[in-house]
Amino acid sequence: MKKQPTWITSSYKTTQIHWAKSQASIMQMLDQVGINEIRFTSMPDRFVLEFMAKFTETAIPKAVRIVVPLFTKLTDSPETRNKELNIIHRILLNHLKAKFVAIGNGLTEFEQEFMSHLVITDKQGRSTTLGEHLLPQYTANIESGEVVQFRLGDGNN
């Protein structure tokens, strides 16, 4: 995204809420919508939230993986790293909340809202998300001109 107004770049920068409290709030929120298989994984350059969503007994479970990049390094001070973790966990909490509010009020459906984060597995057993799998192809098609131009309305505008 090229243009970044202040309301985007300054959001959550002053949060004092520890990332562990936000993580607990995320788990509580997911549990409240019936999701209780939840895993957070922390790595040096990112953290990952994964969960299984199954809203009815007969529904096929849907695996979701949200990868959040970290810009601090392990060599940065613990205060710097914790500040980044505090910020991105608050963003993630509110991001998820907005998604579930939209779903719960009929604005969108779960699969639409989480499509880029839905996990797929290939024949060799390797898993990836739909976004990781399809976005490079989409970008290549757009750049090559092979994709028909998107038009609003009836397609003539």
Image (cartoon, rainbow, N blue to C red):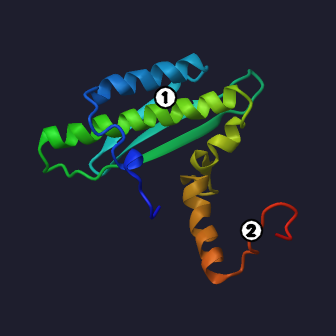
- The picture places residue 75, in percent across and down from the top left corner, at 13, 51
What residue is shown at x 64% (from left), y 57% (from top)? 123
Q: Secondary structure at mark 1?
A: strand
Are there few (<14), some (14-19), or many (20+) residues within 10 Å of tag 1? some
What residue is shown at x 26% (from left), y 35% (from top)? 14
Horizontal side, residue 154 vs residue 123: left or right: right
* Kind of residue at badge 1: Ile
Reply above or below: 92 against 156: above
Distance Cα–Cα, label 2 vs label 1: 37 Å
Q: Is residue 36 visible?
A: no
| Along the line of sight, the residue nearer the viewer: 104 or 125 | 104
Are there few (<14), some (14-19), or many (20+) residues within 10 Å of tag 2? few
Question: Splitting the image into 4 quarters, where does residue 118 fall?
Answer: top right
Label 2, on which residue? Answer: 150
Mark identifier at residue 92: none
- The picture places residue 86, in percent across and down from the top left corner, at 29, 34
Reply above or below: 44 against 13: below
- The picture places residue 35, in percent across and down from the top left corner, at 58, 24
Residue found at the far bottom of this picture: 144
Foreground disc of the pair 2, 1: 2
Which quadrant is home to the C terminus? Answer: bottom right
What residue is shown at x 37% (from left), y 26% (from top)? 22
What residue is shown at x 58% (from left), y 32% (from top)? 52
* Kind of residue at badge 2: Phe
Reply above or below: 113 against 23: below
Label 1, on which residue? Answer: 38
